[in-house]
Amino acid sequence: MEEAFATEIAKSLLGKLSSFASEEFCLAWGLDADLDHLEEILSAINAVLHDAEKQQEQNDKIRLWLQKLREVLYDAEDVLDEVECETLRRKVVKTTGSTSRKVQRFFSRSNMIAFRLRMGHKIKNIIGRLARIESLKSQFNLSEQTIDSHVLHEETVMNRSFESFSGLIGRDKDKERIINLLVEPFKVGDAHPLVFSIVGMGGLGKTALAKSVHDDEIVKTNFEMKIEACVSDGFGLKQVIQKILKSATGDRCADLDEGELKKKLEAILNGRKYLLLLDDVWNEDAQKWLLLKPSLSKGAFGSKVIVTTRSQRVAEIMGTVSAYNLSILGQEHCLSLFYKCAFKERQMELYPDLVGIGKEIVAKCKQIPLAVINLGTQLYGKVDEKEWESVRDSEKWEEKGDALKTTKFPNLVVICQFLTPSLFFIQLFLTSQIKSILFADSLEGPTCKTDFEKCLSKSKHLRSLELLDDSEFEAFPEMIGTLKHLRYLSFDKNTKIKRLPKSIFKLQNLQALIVGEGLEELPRDVRYMISLRFLFLFTKQNRLPQGGIGCLECLQTLIIVLCENLEYFCEDMQGLKSLRKLFISGCNNLISLPRSMKCLTALEKLLIIGCENLDLMTIEEGKEEEIQTLSLQTVLLAGLPATLALPTQFLQGSTNSLRIFIIRNCPNIRVISECFGNLKKLQNLRIIDCPRLSKRCQKETGEDWPKIAHIPKIEIDDDDIEEETSNQGPVSSDLLQTV
C-alpha cells in the first residue's frame, strides 16, 4: 500500500535534514533557519504517522490525508535533493581548478543569492503545505508516539507473532548452533567483544530466533547481564547508547549529552560479562560502528553481541566471526506453521478439504515464515471453503510476500512495454511523481526515440532508469544530463550505444552505472561522477585513461568484464579509497595490473577470472616499497595461465584479514609463497586444476605443506583436507555469489 510508505519517506527526510544541520553550504546559503523549521514541522507529523497508518484501513479520511502527505513528502525529497545536487556540482567545478569567466560567474555572489532565493521559496512552499496537513491531524484524534515506542511496538509485534504462533517451528537446529557459539568459553586471541551476525531477508524470523536464543536458560547462566536494543531507525551513537542504557537500567538518560552517555555505558559494562542483542541493523557506515565499539569493549572478556540484519555488508563491518545466513523455512515446517496458525484444536480432523487447500496456499508462500503466519492467521477459525479458496486464488497477498524483499525505502516504478508505444508513453505523461522507469521491451519504431526523449523530459525527478532489452538506440539524448536526481542507470543489454554524451557526466548524484557491451570508450570525464559507488564496465579501449576511474573516491564495486582489447589499467588506482570489491573477467589481452593495486587499503574481495595473458607479478614491479596494511578477505584467481607466481607483497599486506583464497586453473604457478605461513586468519584454501602446485601442497608429503598446514579447511583438487580441530563447514562451491 503506497500510503504506508509515508513513514519511511518521513524518516529518510528527517535523517537528511539532521545531516544537513552541520553542512557548511546550508549556513553559507542562509538556508539553515528554513531547514530547521521544516525539520520541526516534519517531526510533529512523524509522531502520529504510526497511528495513522494503523487506522487508515477503517478510515477513508485518514487514508486520503496520508495520500496528500505522501505527495508533499515526495516534493520535499526533490527539493532537498536539489540542494544536494547543487553542492555536488560546486564541488566538481571547484576541483577542476578552472578560472574561466563561466566558472567565476558560477561561484559569484549573485549566483549564490539567486540559488538561495529559489531554494528558500521552494522550502517555504513545502513548509506551508506541510503546515496545512499538520493542522488537519487534530481531526483524527491520532496518538503521538516517540521513535522508541514505535520501535518497541514493532519489536513486540514481531516477537509475539513468531513466538506465540510458530514456537520457532523448524529453527531448532539454528538455535542450537547459535547457542553453542555463545556459550563457548573465551580463548586468548578471541575478539572482544565477539560479534555474531544473523543475516537473512525480511520475514525469515531473524528477530524471533535471536530473541529466543537471548532468552534461553542455558544462555542466561553464561552471562551476568543481558541487553537488547532495536536499531532499525538509525545508528547514531547517542541514539544507540540511549537504547542500550534503557534496556540495561530502565532509564533512557535523555538529559545526558553524548560524552556523558558513553561514560555511563562504560561504567555499567565495566568488568561485567554481557550479551547484547542489536536487532534490525541497517547501518553500513563502518565509522558509526567503530565509534560505539570501544565502549562495548569495557565489558569482561567473553562478552558477546548478536546482530540481526538483512545486509551482508553490515555483517562484514560488525562481525568478528563468520555470519550465520538464515535460510528459508523447509516446506514441511511451513505446513506445520500454517496449520498451527490457521486451525483451532482438532479442526484439521474435521475439515480435511481445508487441509488440502492450505497446502496449496503454503506452496505460494515461497517458504517465508512471515507470509505463512500472515495467511494462516487471516484464516484462523474460518471453515468456509470459499474463503480459503479466495485466499488461495488471490494475488494480493503475494504483494505482501514480495514486499519482504524490497529495500527499506521503496519508490515508484513504471514499467513501459511497447505493445503500442505511443499509448504507453501517454500513460507515463499522465503519471505524477515518477521516480523509476524500467523499459521492459525493445525501443523500436519511427516515433519511439522521440517519445523516449519526451518521456525523460517529463521525468525531471527520475531516480532510476533501466533498459532491459536491446534497442535501436545508438546514443542517449543530450538532455539526459538534466536528470540531476538520477541515482541508477543501466543499459547492459544494449549493443548499439558506442559512446556516452558529454552531458551524462553532469550526473553528480549517480551512484550506479551499468554500461552495455557496445560501448567503445569510457572517457576521463567519468571522474565528475563523484557519487558513483557501483560501476559495471564493458569497453573496447586498450588502456583505461589516467584521471578517470582512478578519481572516483566513493566507488565501492568495480566490475570489468569481456573487455577483449584491454591491455592496461589506469596507474592511479590509489585514488579508489572506498573500493571494496574488484571483479575482472574475460579480459584475455590484459597484460598487467598497476602497482597502485597495493594501495587499495579498503579492498575486501578480489576476483580475477579468465585473463589468459595476465601476469599478477606486475603488481610488484619496480622498487620495493613499504608494505601497506590491506583489508582483503576473499581472493579468487582462475584461468590465469600467464601468471607464474603469487604477488607476495600484496598478500603480506593482508596478513590480518584474508580468510578465503582460491586458485583454479593456474597451471604455471609452481610454488606457494612463503608469506602464506603468516596468514593466520586464513580459513579456507582451495587449489584446483593446478597440477604443479597441487603436488607441492599435498598433506604431509608436499614441499609446501608446512606453509599451509595451519589452515583449518584445505581442498586440493579432489582431496578434502580438514584438521580435526576445525569447526568450519565445507567451502562453498559458488563463491561468485560473494561478489
Image (cartoon, grey):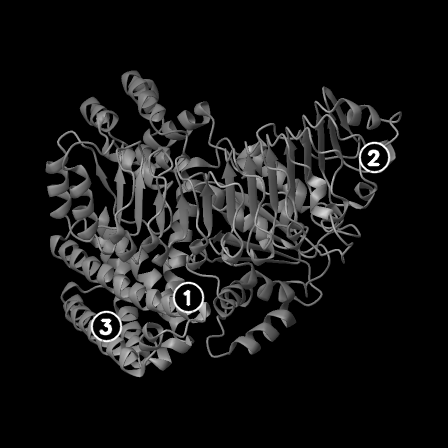
Across and down, in percent, residue 615 comes to 69, 37
Residue drawn at (61%, 75%) of the image = 263
Residue 123: image tag: 3
Pointer 1: residues within 10 angstroms few (<14), some, or many (20+)?
Answer: some
Name the image quarter holding residue 89: bottom left
Which of labels 2 and 1 is toward the front? 1
* Mark 1 element type: helix
Residue toward you, 261 or 354: 261
Q: Disc 3 or 1, which lies upstream in sequence? A: 1
Residue drawn at (57%, 36%) of the image = 174
Which of labels 3 and 1 is toward the front? 1
Residue drawn at (68%, 68%) of the image = 270
The vertical placement of 220 against 695, above or below, is below
The amino acid sitting under disc 1 is Val
Across and down, in percent, residue 449 comes to 19, 40
The residue labelled by disc 1 is: 92
Residue toward you, 228 or 281: 281
Q: Disc 2 or 1, which lies upstream in sequence? A: 1
Label 3 to label 1, Cα distance in Å?
25 Å
The residue labelled by disc 2 is: 709
Quadrant for the C terminus in the image: top right
Label 3 to label 2, Cα distance in Å?
65 Å
